[in-house]
Amino acid sequence: MLRVFICGGSGYTGSELLRILAGHDDVEIVGVTSEKSAGVAVNELFPAFFIYKNLEFENLKLEEIRNRADVYFLALPHGKSQEVASALMDAGRKIIDLSADFRIKDASVYETWYKTQHLYPELLEKAVYGLSEIYREQIKKAQLIANPGCYPTSVILPLYPFLKAGLIEPDTIVADSKSGVSGSGRKADISISFCEVNEDFRAYNIAKHRHTPEIEQELSSIVAKPLTIDFTTHLLPLNRGILSTIYAKLKKSLKTSDAIDILKEFYQNEPFIHIMTDGQLPSIKYVRGTNYCFITAVVNQRTRRLILISAIDNLIKGASGQAVQNMNIMFGIDETKALKNLALIP
């Protein structure tokens, strides 16, 4: 039985980890922290989780928790995972970090975009970027996984096959993404309160969203040269889900059917990638509550542009589901365990 510890279990990603792992029969959750809810039973804060009635939130005390589990999920705010990950690495534990603290390989870039110092830059080289479909072999051998951001997951997965094959002009990429409100985290904030978000739709963080360098880093590694993109985010009046539409100039003539065939061939063995055809387009409602990424492609013959559309649940494939997928890969468990049969959320 794999012993699991969740650091930061009272936020959206932490609670999704609890929900998913409740259906994982190879796992025992031995502890979960929450600074605000320490001493409170998990099912008192989340009544639906009655399966955890004997589990209480506790304070995050490194000396007390570092030897209690085989793998630690860090669902902590950006900047807070660094010290925890370092201590757990020293104790020889495996870590899956859901913050941005180890995603960006250049500490100075991280510090510029996240406005906080990186105290353990030496760990950045050891961290494996946890995009399961792309870095599976590295994940198998990793001690520290930097779980990808939700927006980057929705942008990189559709683009990867075309950049890898050299079919698009890298400098022409434009990504337009929309996310539900849970992407902002479980916190009190007027800007994401019901009355501010309901019956509204707006762009935010134009040309300065913090996921930009993460996307550019991974896309640059594919083409082996520095790459910049235009990336714009929007807030949807929904609880969860991301829809991304991505544009790029084609290097050669392709038909829509050709583009779809490229996606199908590249992802043919991937359990959580679904390529849509027959005129169907990805929709948030198709993926809500699941670990799937739905993708399709359309070629605009008039402009010679490739248009890619993807949909994911930002809390599952964009966070906790992908984290569990990475855990399964790390420990040689069936990759789909506890994920394949996740029910759609109405």
Image (tube, rainbow, N blue to C red):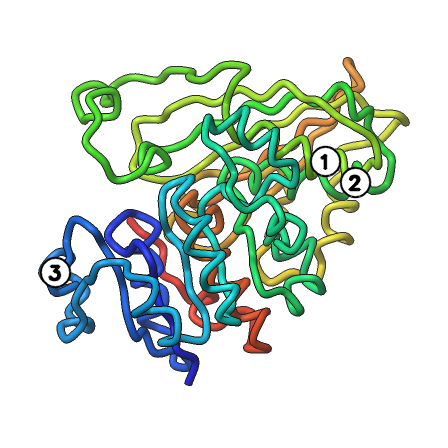
Give residue 117's position: percent from left, percent from top: 49, 33
- Which numbered disc, 3 or 2, marks the residue closer to the eye? 2
Q: Amino acid at mark 1?
A: Leu
User: Is 290 in front, or is 87?
Assistant: 87
Mark 3 — residue? 47
For residue 260, what is the image quadrant?
top right
Q: Which quarter of the picture shows residue 330? A: bottom right
- At x 51% / y 53%, what residue is drawn? 292
- Tell me which amino acid carries mark 2: Ile
Label 1: which secondary element: helix
From the image, tell me which residue sits under label 1. 219
Foreground pick, 254 / 53: 53
Q: Label 3 is placed on what type of residue?
A: Pro
Circle 2: element type: helix
**Frontmost residue, 72 versus 1:** 72
Mark 3 closeness class: few <14, some 14–19, many ≥20 residues within 10 Å: few
Dot 2 surroundings within 10 Å: few (below 14), some, or many (20 or more)?
A: many
In the picture, measured across the screen, residue 12 lies left or right of residue 92, that is left
